[in-house]
C-alpha cells in the first residue's frame, strides 16, 4: 500500500490541493490532525479529505474549533482565527470533526497528532520528549504531527536512546531496522524556514518513508485570509515558513 501521510493542513485549501496532485497516485490518506485553524478554508478542507479513502485523528486546533479546548491556551492570533473558524464551520464539518479519534493503530503504525503520551497537546520536539514517547506506544512506528517540522526520531534499543534526523527530501528512508517516530511536517503552515508544503509517502510494500516538499500558490491563501479578516501575522508567516 502507498499512503499519503499529511498533517497540519490548517484550512489551507491551496496547499492541500497541490499536495494531492503532487502525491498521486496513492491508495489511502493518513491525516495526523489539525485540518482547521489559522487558514481561510476550513469547510473545504474537511470536505476534500472525505473525497478519498482515509483515516484521520484529531488535533488541538480541531478541538479548539469545536470548543473542546479553552482558547486561553492559544496565542492572540490563534485565538482570533479560532473564533472566526467556530463561526464559519458548517454543521456537517463540525459533525465530521467530532467523530475524529485521538489515537489510531493500523498494523505496525500508531497515529496521533501530538504525542503517544498526550495525543492532542504534547510536542515531540527533542530527544527527551522522543525518549519518553517511545514508552507510550507498542507498535514499531508512531506517526505524529503538531510541530510543523519534518523530523524522524530513531531509537537505538541497544543504547536505549534515540537520535534525531531530518530526512532528505525525495530520498526514501528504509524502515524495519529500528523503532521510529515519524513526522511528515505541515501541509498548510510549515515552520522550518521552508514555505513549501510538506508531506510524506509511506510505502508499506517497500517499507520506506519518503519526505516530500512542493510549492503551492501561497498568494491565493493569503488573499483569501485577507478577505476574511484573519490576522496579518498569520498571513505573512506563510511566505517565510515560520
Image (cartoon, helix red, strand yellow):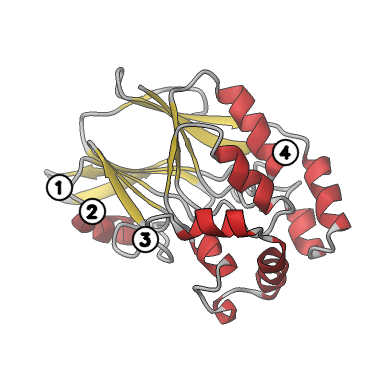
> Is any part of residue 196 visible from this angle?
no
Query: Which numbered disc, 2 or 4, marks the residue that appears first in the sequence?
Result: 4
Query: Which numbered disc, 1 or 3, marks the residue that appears first in the sequence?
Result: 3
Q: Quadrant of residue 115?
A: bottom left
Q: Distance between the residues labelled 1 and 3?
A: 27 Å
CB under 8 Å between callouts 2 and 3? no
Percent x, y of residue 117 = 29, 63
Percent x, y of residue 189 = 64, 49
Task: Name the residue carrying label 4.
Answer: 14
On the picture, is 140 further left or further right than 193?
left
Task: Name the residue carrying label 1.
Answer: 159
CB under 8 Å between callouts 2 and 4? no
CB under 8 Å between callouts 4 and 1? no
Task: Name the residue carrying label 3.
Answer: 119
Q: How far apart are marks 1 and 2 (CA)?
A: 14 Å
Kindly identify which numbered label has been placed on residue 137: none
CB under 8 Å between callouts 1 and 2? no
On the picture, is 22 further left or further right than 118?
right
Q: How far apart are marks 2 and 4 (CA)?
A: 35 Å
In this view, which residue lies farthest toward the bottom? 72
Task: Name the residue carrying label 2.
Answer: 134
Percent x, y of residue 66 = 55, 68
Q: What element carries label 2?
A: helix
Query: Which numbered disc, 3 or 4, marks the residue that appears first in the sequence?
Result: 4
Query: Which numbered disc, 1 or 2, marks the residue that appears first in the sequence?
Result: 2
Amino acid at each position: 500500500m502507498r499512503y499519503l501521510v499529511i498533517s497540519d493542513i490548517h484550512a489551507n485549501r491551496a496547499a492541500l490541493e497541490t499536495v494531492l496532485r503532487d502525491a498521486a497516485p496513492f491508495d489511502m490518506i493518513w491525516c495526523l490532525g489539525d485540518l482547521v485553524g489559522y487558514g481561510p478554508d476550513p469547510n473545504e478542507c474537511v470536505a476534500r479529505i472525505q473525497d478519498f479513502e482515509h483515516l484521520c485523528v484529531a488535533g488541538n486546533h480541531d478541538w479548539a474549533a469545536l470548543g473542546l479546548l479553552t482558547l486561553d491556551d492559544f496565542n492572540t492570533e490563534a485565538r482570533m482565527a479560532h473564533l472566526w473558524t467556530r463561526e464559519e464551520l458548517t454543521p456537517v464539518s463540525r459533525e465530521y470533526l467530532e467523530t475524529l479519534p485521538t489515537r489510531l493503530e493500523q498494523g505496525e503504525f500508531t497515529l496521533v497528532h501530538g504525542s503517544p503520551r498526550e495525543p492532542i497537546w504534547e510536542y515531540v520536539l527533542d530527544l527527551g520528549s522522543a525518549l519518553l514517547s517511545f514508552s507510550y506506544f507498542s507498535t514499531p512506528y508512531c506517526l505524529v504531527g503538531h510541530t510543523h517540522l519534518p523530523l524522524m526520531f530513531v531509537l537505538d534499543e541497544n543504547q536505549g536512546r534515540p537520535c534525531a534526523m531530518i530526512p532528505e527530501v525525495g530520498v526514501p528512508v528504509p524502515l524495519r531496522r529500528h523503532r521510529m517516530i515519524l513526522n511528515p511536517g505541515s501541509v498548510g503552515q510549515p515552520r522550518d524556514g521552508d514555505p513549501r508544503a510538506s508531506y510524506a509517502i509511506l510505502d508499506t510494500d517497500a517499507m520506506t518513508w519518503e519526505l516530500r516538499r512542493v510549492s503551492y500558490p501561497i498568494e491565493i491563501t493569503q488573499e483569501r485570509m485577507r478577505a476574511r479578516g484573519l490576522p496579518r501575522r498569520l498571513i505573512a508567516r506563510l511566505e517565510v515558513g515560520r
